[in-house]
Amino acid sequence: MKIKFNTKISLLILSTLLVVACGNKDSEKMESSEESSMKEEQLVATGIKQITFTKDQYNLAEIETGAIEMRNLSNIIKLNGTIDVEPESMASVSAPLGGYLKTAGRLPGEAIKKGQVLATIENPEFIQIQQGYLESLSRLQFLEEEFNRQKKLREEDINSAKTFQQVSSDYKITQGRVKAYEQQLALAGIIRSSVQNGNITRTANLYAPISGFIKASNVNIGDYVSPQDVLFELVDLNDIHLALNAFERDLEKLEIGQTVKFSLSDDNTFNRTAEIFIIGKATGSDRMTPVHCHIKQENQKGLLPGMYVKAWVESGTNKQNAIPSAALVQYEWKDYVILQTEETENGYTFKLEQVKKGIEQEGYTAITFADGATVQNFKPVVKNAYSILSALRNSEEEE
């Protein structure tokens, strides 16, 4: 019994020692892994991670370097918005009296002059309007003569006042009826003088109310269109402007007459200029305020209403460390610059250095390096920096 007990005790102690030993090893592995991970993060954060390219590799990757410069960069207010036009430079065309489309050959993008025919509408009611106009016009001519005659008789006290009042009333009513018919003819697009010459038509033209371009065409020949249907949308591009939005916190820094630099959403050159002429007096639910800017004529080429733009306004300047924006790379959601630290007969050495981005302006971005970072006289890679980053990552995986 004693031997058995001792054997059991021994086995128990041995098992315990094995578990503790394994636990220590696992703990050591975890600590080693954590230390390795921390060291890896430190390497990246402090810019120690390096790689060397041979001259052949360097030339094959078409790498180019630039310089870290002290540049006068403005503190800027960022805005965004769209290209827009003045309300009077846009027009929607419909058929005020409705009808069937007989012709409609206008396409989006087509240039149009004010008064040009856009489409032809057919409606049997046009005939009734013209007939009513001619009848009323004829009666008006008769009543005008009768009115003048009765007026003269009344002045000579030959006719009664009641007779003159009746003729006068009929004359004025018919005058109003003729004017109403004239308005209907104008709405339909029927020329009044043509009807007066006896030319009755069941078709009428739709005319362009402004000069410009056709923005949209919603017509098919044979369709019946009602007065509510918009058949054409016209836009005059001679007075386009920026319709921007500014955060309410930036409003006190904006002024009428300030110069705005802008570019289309897929462009970062900001080589177009405009001038603020309206700053909104209220903010929306998104805490944004509208800002409208005139675009200088020489900067309007290629711009169309509805295009998205990004813009900025200068608000004071100061000197800052800056590099070409193309030199910045992103790695694990952080910003870095790759610096060429050495050039020898054997090749070129690069290191990865974490930075904090600042103002981006005219192709340059202000940067701040970590405290203690050694970057003096090093050249930032401005072209194909990502090929070096890729090589650094591959070297990590191999290690």
Image (tube, rainbow, N blue to C red):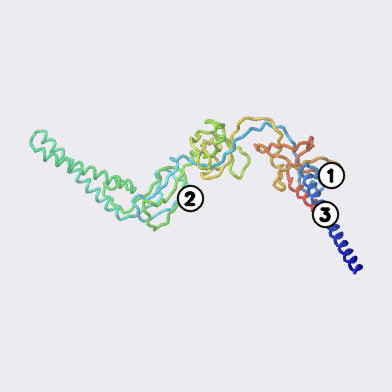
As displayed, is residue 128 above or below residue 77?
below
Give coordinates of residue 127: x percent, y percent.
28, 53
Going from the N terminus, do you reach mark 2 or mark 1 first?
2
Tag 3 secondary structure:
helix
As displayed, is residue 12 above or below residue 319?
below
Q: Identify the residue under disc 1.
A: 347
Give coordinates of residue 298: x percent, y percent.
55, 36
The label on residue 124 is: none
Tag 2 secondary structure:
loop
Going from the N terminus, do you reach mark 3 or mark 1 first?
3
- Tell me the amino acid under the disc marked 3: Lys
The label on residue 108 is: 2
Tag 1 secondary structure:
loop
- Circles 2 and 1: CB atoms closer than 8 Å: no
Q: Identify the residue under disc 3.
A: 29
Give coordinates of residue 184: x percent, y percent.
30, 47
Residue at image point 54% right, 31% down:
255
- Tell me the amino acid under the disc marked 1: Gly
Mark 2 Cα within 10 Å, few/some/many (few <14, many 20+)?
A: some
Residue at image point 57% right, 39% down:
79
